[in-house]
Amino acid sequence: MARSRRGFLKGAAAGAAVAVVAPPHAATAQETTPRNATAQPNATTVAADTGRRPATVASRIVEKPGSDFMVDVLKTLDFEYLAANPGSTFEGLHESLINYGDNKMPEFLTCCHEESAVAMAHGYAKIEGKPMIAMMHGTIGMQHASMAIYNAYVDRVPIYMVAGNHADGAERTPGVASLHSAQDIGALVRDYVKWDDQPYSLGHFAESAVRAYNIAMTPPMAPVLIVANYELQAHPNLQSDLRIPKLSRTTPPQGDSGAVAEAAQMLVAAERPLIITERTARTPHGMKLMIELAETLQAPVSNQERMDFPNRHPLAGTGGVGYQADVVLNLEVNDVSNSARAARARGAKTISITSLNLSHKSNIQEFGHYPEVDLNIGADAEATLPALIEACKKLITADRRRALDERGAKLAEAHKQARARDIELAAVGWDASPVSLARLCAELWPLIKNEDWSLVSWQGFISQWPRRLWTFDKHYQYIGGQGAGGMGYGAPAAVGAALANKKHGRFSVSIQTDGDLNYAPGVLWTAAHHQIPLLTIMHNNRGYHQEVMFIEQQASIRNRGADRAHIGTKLWNPNIDYAKLAQAYGQYAEGPITDPKDLAPAFQRAIAQVKKGEPALIDVVTQPR
Amino acid sequence: MRRLFMFVLAVATVSAQGPSGNAAHGKELFVKYSCYACHGFSGQNGPGARLVPMKIAQAGFIAYVRNPPRPNQMPSYSAKAVPDADMADIYAYLKTLPDSAPSAKSIPVLNQILTAP
């Protein structure tokens, strides 16, 4: 409601300004306004409502506003895009970006929610390996964005955030500007950004803006926040000696040489080592290093988060039935406490290499239980892998090599059997309606496998069927999940990732859960408006399904029936028509599809649209998981 | 006398196997009690065990639901939560569901995945 009022007041203020400045076309526009149109408030009313007094033309013109310099600073950091929902606290910077900055590098992306803007930046960074800007409007924009920021923080993704704020209470107008401002606006999200600053001069802005980029991109990567004070944007830049510091990047931390040697000894001596990786491959090279480590050790690699390891590699998996690891190497695993506890129980050793050891905050408990591990290396895993691989190779004798290769052959056979089992399981309920997730993924695969495809959605709610059926061997083919489990991430992150894929000519596909899309479906419009090619297949199970199962479990524990588990958890009665929703936002869409025989033809039609450079959506009514 | 014997035999059989259920009602109950949540609307798609084809007897089925071996995965339901009569109806419904699990080789798209290098 406040935003609507703000929009009205700003529109009214603009109208009042027109009355003062009176461009040539203004009189014509006023004359053609119907008599029964909503009356526009006059300058006196606007002044009373907003506290803004109309001024003379000469005193209103600001040459070289501070926000122009802010754009100069941001342009040195090579941002391609800026995602934002517009707001008055950054109106000066907004104007500078699109006029002074020519709306290029960065290009402004219109978002319908700040959570969408940040989550788009989240998805973009996971493909492109660098941040884009998400801009927030004062207190309200920051609070809208906060959940998406938290997801990115836990997912260790760099996002460059800029927030507007009326910091100077003397200049701040009464009413809306006060509602949208804070004494310390960074405090709203400080628990889950890596660094923030509120510069009070343009020189300070330049320094902090460059520093923020470097901090965001140094592992463990995370969102950063720079506050662009309204007054700093609006006032003329009268300084002639301002300079923009050169960006100097901090190298990622590498593991201590002694600790790396000890890890190598444990791994080479292990009879059944296991590598668990979550976010190791920050770059495509990281995936090559992961393959080299696995093949050096002939150790299985469990990888269900980001794209760290090819899923069809013979060493992909957990080693097969009965493979009880005696040494577990955790690489960039956020919470190793579970696997460490299990390892300890069977007498196995645990090694952890993660840069998270170097960054801790107190309030939010995302760090999990204390990791009781045998060797804890505080370092970035990708940066440490070359030394670890080298150390392992030096320790492997010819005899040991033969033993490792024998193990590798057994692991390859276990991998092959596991894959065959998965494919057989995909046939279960093949003709079922609602459609099985396995069939949805199986029908989609032959239609995209010859494209340069990228799966830009999480597989956790679709029983990992793409990983079980498709062939993932490129770094950009999977971006993992939300980070902190916050819903509302999926749709905008997919759009952001698809945007990053666009310039590489890749085909982006998202298997989109219905509950997630309903948080902020306006991102469908953003994708259509900015012509972001993305195939969205709805996993429409008509509910917040995880919660259905949780409520069911609670009812059981309390000896009550689960016959009310649908209350508060289901999205039915009426069913939501996602094809109509997407069409309303300007996308090509079909559905709902309930007969699995209709999948492939619908997918083909939608793929044709996406290959033209547009987003398209197919609504499939699915089994719960 | 022979008629009486047959009647007694029939009652004894029902007592051993439980009353036969109403499959149509069971279909409603399968959704109402959220059984579909883990086992799928098909009774065989989801994180829960495959219930199709239903191979255990009704008594065993009910006993399993009352006291599952891993209650942190499969919630237990007492007779208070799901009465025996409802369990019988659900069982009857599950018995009507077709086993839709052809071999992967018989499905072209799965066979392609299976045989892909």
Image: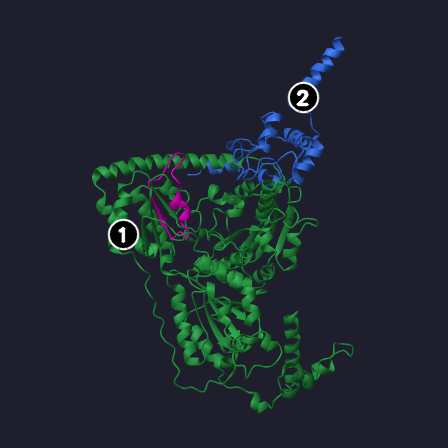
Q: Residues within 10 Å of mark 2 (few under 14, many from 20)?
A: few
Residue type, mark 1 in image: Val
Query: For numbered disc 2, what is the local secondary structure?
Result: helix
In the image, taking residue B10 as reference, residue A107 lies left or right, namely: left
Judging by colour alone, the chain drawn in green in this rendered image is A
Residue under pointer 1: A260
Q: How is the rendered protein coloured?
A: by chain
Note whether A524 is above or below B64 in the view shown. below
Furthest residue in direction right, as rendered:
A36
Note whether A538 is above or below A425 in the view shown. below
In the image, taking residue A71 as reference, residue A267 lies left or right, namely: left
**Could you say where residue A106 lies in the image, as x and y percent from the top left?**
48, 70
Residue type, mark 2 in image: Ser
Furthest residue in direction top, as rendered:
B1
**Could you say where residue A174 lies in the image, as x and y percent from the top left?**
61, 81
Query: A129 and A174: which one is in front?
Result: A174
Query: A179 and A131: which one is in front?
Result: A179
In the image, taking residue A354 as reference, residue B109 lies left or right, namely: right
Q: Main secondary structure of the magenta part?
A: loop
Q: Residues within 10 Å of mark 1 (few under 14, many from 20)?
A: many
Query: A277 and A508: which one is in front?
Result: A277
Judging by colour alone, the chain drawn in blue in this rendered image is B
Task: Work out whether residue A359 can be spotted.
Answer: yes
Q: Quadrant of the C terminus of chain A?
A: top right
Query: The magenta stretch spans which residues?
Result: A316-341
Q: Chain under label 2? A: B
Picture disc at residue B15: 2
**Could you say where residue A43 lies in the image, as x and y percent from the top left?**
67, 85
